[in-house]
Amino acid sequence: MTRNLSFRLETAFPIYDPQVKAEILEYIQLQLSDNVKARKLDKNLQNNYHKGNSDFPVRSQVETYYMMKRKLDGMGEKEGK
C-alpha cells in the first residue's frame, strides 16, 4: 500500500474544552488498544503485527464506528427521537 508522505499536512492545536479533550483521549486510547490489525515499526524497520496484552480482539476502526454510533444513538434518545 502506498502512503502520501510527500504531500502530507499535519497540524497541532490546543484543546481547551475538557469534554472535547476527554473524547479525543478516549478515541486515542481505543486506537492504541487495537490488537487485530495494529502494526508496530521496530528498530529494524520491521512492520509486524502488534498483539497487545488482551485476549479479547479489538479492531479499532470497527470499534470506533460502534463508539460513535452509540454516542449518536444516545443523542437521539435525549432529544426524544
Image: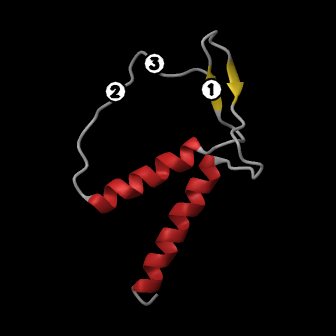
Indicate whether 38 appears above or below 3.
below
Give yes or no for contact between labels 3 and 1 (Cβ–Cβ under 8 Å): no
Q: In the rendered structure, find residue 5 and report the number of the disc placed on it.
A: 3
Q: Distance between the residues labelled 3 and 1?
A: 18 Å
Q: How far apart are marks 2 and 1 (CA)?
A: 22 Å
Q: How far apart are marks 3 and 2 (CA)?
A: 9 Å
Residue bearing the label numbered 1? 40
Q: Residue at x 60, y 48 (%)?
A: 61
Residue type highlighted by circle 3: Leu
Q: Which residue is drawn at 24% across and 58% down?
A: 17
Indicate whether 26 appears above or below 19.
above
Residue bearing the label numbered 2? 9
Residue 70 position in % (x across, y down): 54, 70
In the current view of this chain or complex, which residue is farthest to the bottom?
Answer: 80
Give yes or no for contact between labels 3 and 2 (Cβ–Cβ under 8 Å): no
Residue 80 position in % (x across, y down): 43, 90
